[in-house]
Amino acid sequence: MAGTVAAVEGRDGWSSRTAFVLAAIGSAVGLGNLVRFPAEAGANGGGAFVLFYIFCIVLIGLPVLLSETLIGRHGQAAAPESYRKMAEESGASKQWELVASLGVLSAFLILSFYCVLGGWVLYYIGAFAGDVLSSGATSPAFAGSTFEEVEGLFPAMIANGPVTVGLNILFLAITLFFVIRGVSGGIEKVAVYLMPIFFILLIGITVYGLFGGAMNETLAYLFTFEPEKLTAEVMLAAVGQAFFSLSLGVAGMVTYGAYVGRDVNLAKTSSIIAGADTGVALIAGLCIFPIVFAAGLAPNGGLGLMFQTLPHAFQEIPFGTLIGLAFFVMVAFAALTSSVGLMEVPSAWVMERFNFPRSVAVPVVTVGAAALGALSALSTGMLSGFHPLGFIPLFEGMGMLDTLDTLTGKITMPICALLTAVFVGWIAEKRLIDSENGLSGGLHRFWLFLVRWLCPVALTAILLFGLFG
């Protein structure tokens, strides 16, 4: 497609609109879509939660997503420089670049512990691959092992420091392999090839559940409309899930937007990205819970669902070894496309701030993430007693991994997204916004209303709820 950033300005950029959309979807789709959303939906009113979640995606997530992307395309630079350029052209303080700097920091911190989780996924790929080789593809998983033995794989793995640190470094190295090759030569490639395979695996496992799992029970669990369960707390949970599902507040879409050509309509592409991300979250429930319910297990949430409940469920179903392997490969693809996006954010900043070539900037970021990630990897084992911010009530009793997760999820990301909405809605020159967002008429006025009023209110609520419960 003509008009890419690379062609226009001599910079590396997406080769096509499709490449940008797939990369952005890959960056947004991650572990939260596959595990957190289905568990939240089932526990918080089923269909009422899902409906309100979609409402939040459209009215809160999508407006902020478009805001971040248009800043990046206008600036054509790393996130802080893009904010500064738009601020200066709007006659505002260049200190607005600090919003993006906070997002860059958030991306780096998340990268450091996200790759720890990615390493755990690699461990289970190895476990299921070994099981396929030893037992064959048609048998249930881990034949001859008890439930307790399968459930015990996870605590044994996360308590093993050398294993968790090594897996973290391996996942970071895989991420580096793609990011160091640039936008069109690496980041784009991982999205263009892996995202279609991810969707094929997701649909394939879902179809298996449709015929071989407890689909009726799943539909009742996820989509029974129980409005009485839609309390203020549940609504805030839906708002938060919509916000985190799109990976807002980490300067990711600002960074990716900087590589987008002028011929791409940002409003349309942002809608496609948000729609695909929401679709994955909904289908994930139809993929996971039929298998869980067919095995007679409780639909626990969080990491326990993925790393303990599901492996046991694969023990109870035909082709469990093969389905389990396919599932964790699918999860690894989702985690990798997200980690690639996270690594690109600080890498782009290092390249621009210190005038480093990509071949130097990406390894620098990787080494820093590996060093910090080692503390997260060890926080579930030998450093479990190390609570870096334990003197603050919000972080009391938390190890490094949980500390970084809470710090970014409850503080830095909501602040960054909130200030982005304020910046685009109230500070940036209207003509600059109008030239980038791809909207007109009533849709433009409605989007501007959401960015100016509803998004700041909702993001403030997320921030306060996260801080004070």
Image (tube, grey):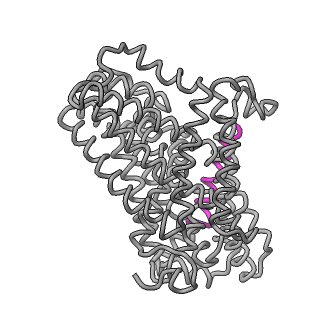
Residue toward you, 294 or 323 = 323
Q: Residue at 62% across / 61% down in the picture?
A: 345
Rendered view: 92 above or below 360: below
Whether residue 199 sits left or right of residue 101 in the image: it is left
Magenta segment: does it hold 453?
yes
At which x and y percent is residue 58? Answer: 46, 59
Report whether residue 22 is seen.
yes
What range is drawn magenta here? 450-469
Number of labels in the image equals: 0
Quadrant of the image occupied by residue 136: top left
Q: Residue at 27% across / 34% down in the picture?
A: 322
Rendered view: 157 above or below 404: above
- Could you tell me which quadrant the C terminus lies in? top right
Residue sitting farthest toward the left? 211
Report whether residue 223 is seen.
no
At which x and y percent is residue 35? Answer: 44, 38
At which x and y percent is residue 409? Answer: 63, 45
Whether residue 96 sits left or right of residue 72 in the image: it is right
Rendered view: 350 above or below 13: above
At which x and y percent is residue 55? Answer: 44, 54
Q: Residue at 38% across / 56% down in the picture?
A: 195
- Could you tell me which quadrant the N terminus lies in? bottom left
Magenta segment: does it hold 322?
no
Q: Residue at 42% across / 85% down in the picture?
A: 2
What secondary structure do most residues of the magenta stretch adopt? helix
Quadrant of the image occupied by residue 140: top left
Whether residue 204 sits left or right of residue 337 in the image: it is left
